[in-house]
């Protein structure tokens, strides 16, 4: 399993395990506000995230976050999706059943249940990155949201 560097512009970002990023993108894409316009920014971002979450891109999940948030409309769409997902995750069970997660249409299979806090941590890192929190570049960033060994409160 690979890792991908998520960059929010100017080379600043964080590393994340591909499986966690792909699952997070799959959930987040479902929280992008619907648009009937095929050419809208929201539609483009949703399609990008659905493809990126498919599981084909080991070590280089194609996420153009810097481009996605380069306009006010794009930034608002992404932040709205992330915050909507974050609200849902905070109300979700502590563990997401792998059987249900595996119904989401990704090519890789989850062999264990997914701890919800991991996806919450990824969501919070995305919000921080979009809002300009410094993480460092690909060579210096130590952040890897969602990858801790177990529940942080245990």
Image: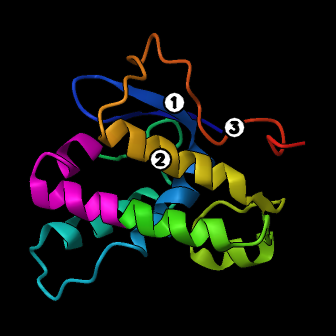
Residue 105 position, x and y percent, is: 57, 75
Pointer 1 local density, CA inside 10 Å: few below 14, some 14–19, many at least 20: many
Q: Is residue 18 above or below residue 115?
A: above
Q: Earlier in the sequence, mark 3 or mark 2?
A: 2
Q: Quadrant of the N terminus?
A: top right
Q: Are marks 1 and 2 in contact (CB under 8 Å)?
A: no
Q: Is residue 97 above or below residue 22?
A: below
Question: Which stretch is magenta?
Answer: 65-80
Question: Which structural element holds mark 3?
Answer: loop
* Disc nearer the start of the sequence (1/2): 1
The residues bearing labels 3 and 2 have C-alpha atoms spaced at a distance of: 19 Å
Q: Which residue is mark 1?
A: 15
Q: Nearer the viewer, residue 75 or 59?
A: 75
Query: Which residue is located at x 48 percent, y 18 percent?
Result: 141
Q: Position of residue 56 (x, y in %)?
A: 50, 53
The label shown at residue 57 is 2
> Quick one: label 3 or label 1, which is nearer the N terminus?
1
Q: Which residue is mark 3?
A: 147
For residue 6, which quarter of the picture?
Answer: top left
Give the quarter of the image for residue 134. top left
């Amino acid at each position: 399993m690979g890792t991908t560097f998520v960059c929010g512009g100017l080379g600043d970002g964080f590393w994340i395990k591909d499986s966690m990023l792909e699952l997070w993108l799959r959930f987040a894409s479902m929280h992008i506000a619907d648009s009937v316009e095929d050419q809208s920014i929201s539609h483009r971002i949703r399609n990008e995230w659905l493809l990126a979450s498919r599981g084909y891109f080991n070590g280089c999940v194609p996420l153009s976050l810097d481009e996605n948030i380069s306009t006010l409309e794009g930034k608002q769409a992404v932040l709205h999706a992330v915050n909507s997902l974050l609200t849902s995750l905070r109300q979700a069970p502590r563990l997401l059943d792998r059987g249900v997660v595996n119904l989401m249409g990704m090519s890789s299979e989850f062999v264990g249940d997914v701890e919800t806090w991991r996806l919450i941590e990824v969501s919070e890192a995305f919000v921080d990155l979009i809002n300009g929190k410094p993480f460092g570049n690909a060579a210096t960033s130590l952040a890897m949201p969602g990858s801790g060994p177990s529940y942080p409160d245990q």
